Amino acid sequence: MDLDYLQMLMGEEEIVVEEEGEGYRNIWVVAERAGDELVPVTLEMLNQARQLASTLGAYVMAVLLGGGEALAQELIYYGADKVFLCDDPALEEYALEPYAKALGDLFTEKMPEIVLFGATDMGGELAPRLARRLGTIVLTNCTGLTLDAAQRTLVCTMPAYGGEYSEVVAFSPEVHPQMVTVRPGAFGRPYRDEYRSAEIEAVAVDLDGVQSRVKVLNVVAQVEREPVPLDRARIIVSAGRGMGDAEGFALVEKLAAALGGEVAGSRGAVDEGWIDEEKQVGMGGATVRPDLYIACGISGAIQHYFGIQDAKFVVAINRDEKAPILKVADVGIVADAKEVIPAILEALGA
């Protein structure tokens, strides 16, 4: 049972985190935000941190650079036992040098045992530089995190050669803090519990003389969005032979674009030449775990279900009321996808 949940049952109003003691302790999550929202990988790291903390008998600490108390409170709702808020104006927008200085000073003082970063542009740039500053190492792009509880060391799974195989690497007990970057989508999100309460500690940062070496000269309002690998996509719109022809498949592409998602398909879509094999979902293709998976004209044989069984929410559109995918979908629509998708696009204003 989680310590915070036990305290809630006992009637305590707030989680009180004891920080006394020498040595490295607790699991820290470096929160990442996009404007006024937390980046999804931050929530996924909190989820995994809670599991690791229950094994170690530790607390989950989160550190937020900018963003204000509202986002700090969200971190508590999603599992943080305490949030350190560095709300200096210089940290409102990400810049390597100020962020590295603020985190470096905080980690030197608080001595975290384990630190989790997202394997994002920010985390990929920031984590190695902090590791150098703190005299430690960082393992990157981890898709699995477990613990050797006897040694109190982190055991990390890291894909190699484009995911053809994985390496399992453990930290040495002498390495502190243990720092990793976590691949987005590797772990599920935690439950958002608005009844959780914990302390938000404001942290004063000393950024005198610290300036970013990069200056933003111009902001481009619209850029071509790079495709997201299917195993990391949060929204996927997938097509099967039931779309009929290339014109039907074009509707699937329009829906994916309107939702900001990725296009995929079944083996039938590959055979029809609508998608390349790397966009195939199912046995022999990609295994996905998006927040939303929309299957258009896909019958849903076991080979396809194998690839979507970890999807959080599945919507299936199929003319055949006996299609297997309708039995596993959260929402099933018995209709021609060529008629349903235009209606969805109209409702979205696309």
Image (spheres, grey):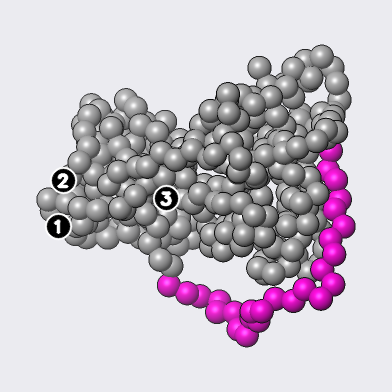
In the picture as drawn, the residue positioned furthest to the top comes out as 10
Q: Which residue is mark 1?
A: 273
The disc, 1 or 3, on the residue closer to the chain's N-terminal end is: 3
Using residue 238 as the reference point, say whether residue 207 is left or right of it: right
Q: Secondary structure at mark 3?
A: loop
| Horizontal side of residue 158 vs 202, given as left or right | left
Q: Which residue is mark 3?
A: 233
Which residue is denoted by mark 2 in the rendering?
Answer: 268
Pick the residue in front: 159 or 176: 176
Task: Name the N-terminal-most of marks 2 and 1.
Answer: 2
Furthest-left residue in this view: 271
**For residue 197, what is the image quadrant?**
top right
The dot on residue 164 is none
Find the distance from the CA under tag 2 to the CA under tag 1: 9 Å
Mark 2 or 3, which is nearer the eye? 3
Q: Residue at x 69, y 69 (%)?
A: 97
- Callout 3 amino acid: Ala
In the image, residue 124 above or below residue 313: below
The residue depicted at 54 percent of the width and 30 percent of the height is 147
Q: Is residue 200 magenta?
A: yes
Relative vertical location of residue 172 with respect to residue 263 in this rendering, above or below: above
Q: Amino acid at mark 1?
A: Gly
Report the front residue among 172 and 138: 172
Query: Magenta segment range?
Result: 199-224
Q: Is residue 39 magenta?
A: no
Q: Give yes or no for contact between labels 2 and 1 (Cβ–Cβ under 8 Å).
A: no
